[in-house]
Image (spheres, grey):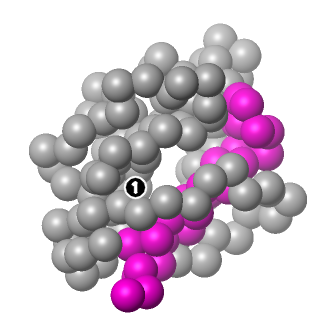
Amino acid sequence: MAIVIEPPNSVVLLVGRDEFTAPASFAGNAVSATEDCVAVGVLSVDDGSTTVELGRSPHIAGLSRLRELSLETEGQVSIRDVYNREYEVLLVKPGKYAVTVWGNDPTEPDVVAFEVRPELT
């Protein structure tokens, strides 16, 4: 289910642990990641809210793939903001998961979907 948030600092996080390591910078990209955290730079809250969805098969139509990566989890994946406020949780088995980040804009999306699925080994 998609939810609408107003993330401070225009950043949405997808984390796999309570004690995660956020990326140090975006290096000019909309999406940056560490082994246990994915960060997405989104539209400034001054310009509007951001719609986010988390799931094994997100349902927001019309989005483009922004990035694919791997995420280490301890049994849940959650959407958070930079102040660690939790917005949505997906329970999973501990381990590595493939994550596809979808968005409606390649540089500053205001609609983001996180597709989380078991990583094939």
Quarter of the figure that contains the C terminus: bottom left
Q: Nearer the viewer, residue 90 or 22?
A: 22
* Residue under pointer 1: 88
Quadrant location of residue 44?
Answer: top right
Where disc 1 sits, the SS reads strand
| Amino acid type assigned to the residue bearing label 1 in the image | Glu
Q: Nearer the viewer, residue 32 or 5?
A: 32
Q: Residue furthest bottom?
A: 121
Residue pictured at 62% horizontal, 34% vertical = 30
Q: Position of residue 115 (x, y in %)?
A: 56, 68
Q: Is residue 61 left or right of residue 87?
A: right
Q: Position of residue 120 (x, y in %)?
A: 43, 86
Specify the segment rendered in magenta.
97-121
Query: Would residue 120 be counted in the magenta stretch?
Result: yes
Give above or below for 71 relative to 23. Answer: below
Query: Would residue 101 be counted in the magenta stretch?
Result: yes
The crowd level at tag 1 (other Cα within 10 Å; few <14, some 14-19, many 20+) is some
Residue pictured at 49% horizontal, 38% vertical = 32
Quadrant location of residue 27?
Answer: top right
Query: Is residue 49 shown to the viewer in this render?
Result: no
Q: Is residue 16 left or right of residue 70?
A: left
Q: Position of residue 29 (x, y in %)?
A: 62, 31
Residue pictured at 36% horizontal, 61% vertical = 71
Residue pictured at 71% horizontal, 36% vertical = 109
Give above or below for 79 relative to 110. Answer: below
Q: Position of residue 73 (x, y in %)?
A: 24, 65
Q: Is residue 46 left or right of residue 82?
A: right
